[in-house]
Structure formats: C-alpha cells, structure tokens
Amino acid sequence: MRKIISIIILFFFFQNTFSQKYDLKPEYSDCITALEITDTLIHFKDSPKGKGNVIEFKSTDYSSPYFFPQEDNSLWIKFTVPNKCTLSLEIIPDTLSDDYDFLLFKYTGNEADFCNKITFKSLKPLRSIISTNDRKIACKTGLSIIETKTNVPPGYGKSYGNAVKANSGDVFYLAINNVWEPAFTDPNYARGGFILMLHYTEINNANVKIVDKQSQLPVSANIDIICNKKPDTLNAFLHPKKVSEYSFSKKASTTYIFNVSAKGYLGSNTEFFSKTNSDTTFTIALDKIVSGAKMNIENIYFAGNKASILPASLPALEMLYLTMKENPELKIEIQGHVNCPTNNCLESPAWLQNLSDKRAEAVQEYLIIKGI
C-alpha cells in the first residue's frame, strides 16, 4: 500500500601587492637550512636551481606517492601557522613549461633529527603532489579544501590535494621540486619564477547528527551540504551517504543548507548560519513517513505574479526530489498557498487560485523532469 502524504509548499513573492622578494640561495635547497618565511604571498623571481649540500631525495620508486622520484632542483621553506585553521596553498608558475611538485611535512622538533628522518624516509609527508602539471589550469598546484586526495604519485593525476588542519604555532616544512635544465631546447623552459600563496582559513568543525524524531535514535541518511545557497554547489560541496553522524570544516559568516533524505522518513531542508569560528554540533530530527503526514517546505521562491521557480528554490526542491527517490513507493499531494493581504489585493480570487495551481504544477514538473 502506498503511503500518501501532503507536501505543503509556502509560495513567497518576493592590493594585490607582493611582500618582499627572496633570492633563492643555494642553502635553501636543504632541509636543515630551509628558508623561513612569515609572508603569505611571495613571488620568487627564479625557479629553484641545484640540490644543495644534502640530497634528501635520491633515486627511488617512481610509483611512490610520498617522495620525489629524485631531487632535481629543490627549495625548502619553513613557516609557522599563526592561528587554528585549515591550511591551503597554491604554487603558480610564471611559465607553463615549469612543472612543480611539492611535499608538506609537519615539524616534529629537533631540526637535525627531523631532516634526517626525511632523508631516510622514516617520516612521511602529510601531503605530496608529484603529478605532471596540467596546462588546463595554468600548471598550478597546491592544497584545497574541496579536494580529498592526500598523496598523488608521479604521472597524470590531481594537481591539488586536500587542505591540512593546523593549530596555532604548528610548524611546517614545504619541499618544492622541479625539473630545471638550462640546456633544454625550449627557451621558455624553467626561465620564470613562481608565486607561493599560503592561506590560513579559520575553519572549525560542524558536527551533524541525524535522529528519529520520536525515539531520538540515530537514522542512516543521505546528506547534501550546500554552501552560501549557491545552486552550483548542490551535490558538489559535501554529500555523505548512509551516515547518521557527519563532521566537516565550516567557515564563519557562511550559510549552510542541509538536505537530508532517508528511507522511511520525510526529508529535511535545514538552513544554518555560521556566525563564529567555534565548533558547533546540531541535530536534525526526521519524522517517519505515515499516511496523511504533512511536510512543510518553506524555501520555495517564484518570480512575482508568475509560476517561474527562482534558483534560490533549488536546494529545497532537491530535498523533495531526494526524499521521493529514496522512497519510490511514496505518493505525494502538492499543495500551495499564495499569500495576498486582504486589504491590499489587486487580483481577483480566481486569478490567485490559478496562480497557486500553476505554481504547484511547476513543482510537479520539476520532479517529473528529475525522473519521478
């Protein structure tokens, strides 16, 4: 027997300047004499040249995702994180011919011992991106909060890895390596320098729990997390499947929408504004699907006096679609309400009824196009 519920939809009317430049001295090619920086935006006017006095990365397994196959022309950079954050970075070559690889290590104390551990490969990097440069993105590489890979081996692969969570005072060593051959026939090869950008984004954790509204027991659900109400982040930002609890890094002054769908439950479209950088835990309680149940979906917007759905409605409509998809036996009735002040209504009741009908039909058409 199909369960029939009513979906109540409320229709609303409605300088870039670089810091000091650094000359790449030969000693900066060694871990023990790394270049210590405090700036977050640096333009190195030259590419690294030379291996320094110590060869930290000798010829090794070319399939290793953790270390350079060999040290060609290296640069070691040391920096201290100023605040609790998610650390991301970018390396942007001046010319497309330069192919930069990098390793990121977290300092463990005792500089000599730390560098020796790296040389003897007893300390693996937190992140390593050794893939061939991608000209489609101007040969850039780095770490990003939207990527998931931590280690990318030599060959064709991701140019960016997953950003690193860091605490105030954490010290990191960044080893940058590139193939620099002054005798290479291409006159543009490794002739330019590169830009290094460090980002200390103050992001804290949000912990989402999905429970049964009556029993408060955990419910396995699918979650779509949408950032700042942008439709293009739908199903692209974060979308864990079949979880009852999920944690992610959130930013301050950011709006998040949580679309939750689960087998046997009415969906939920919850909006949350992150004001501060404090950790946050919140619970989303789902109602079980029973005949005659009602689900209010408030964030559906239309163009004034029209049945044209506005883009801001897509997260809520997507939640409805996901609920239907997760529960294919479910049959729904769509009800809409057009609000018009009784003392200032220029349209006739029949016109308003027709508009309400057309808007309900627009929601129905959205679901049909999506495959319901």
Image (cartoon, grey):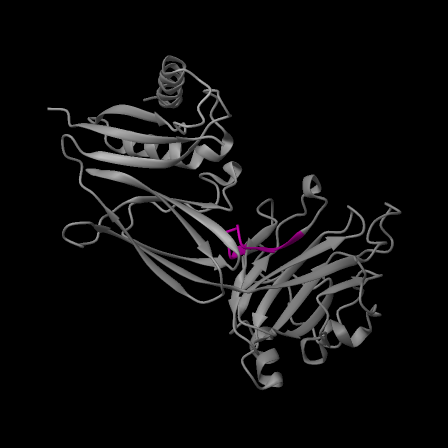
Q: Residue at x 76, y 58 (%)?
A: 195
Can the viewer see residue 347 in this picture?
yes
Q: Write down the region rendered in magenta.
A: 141-152
User: Residue 338's spot in the image, x, y percent?
Assistant: 38, 26
- Left or right of residue 329, residue 253 in this image: right
Q: Which of 174/188 is in front?
A: 174
User: Residue 155's spot in the image, x, y percent?
Assistant: 60, 47
Q: Decide: is 20 above or below 191.
A: below
User: Residue 241's spot in the image, x, y percent?
Assistant: 33, 44
Q: Which residue is drawn at 53% across and 71% down?
A: 84
Q: Decide: is 336 above or below 66.
A: above
Q: Which of 13/189 is in front?
A: 13
User: Residue 199's spot in the image, x, y percent?
Assistant: 63, 62
Quarter-of-image position of residue 345: top left
- Left or right of residue 65, residue 368 in this image: left
Image quadrant holding the N terminus, namely top left
Q: Decide: is 212 above or below 47.
A: above
Can the viewer see residue 262 in this picture?
no
Q: Which residue is drawn at 15% across and 28% down?
A: 3
Q: Does the magenta stretch include residue 199?
A: no
Q: Does the magenta stretch include residue 145?
A: yes
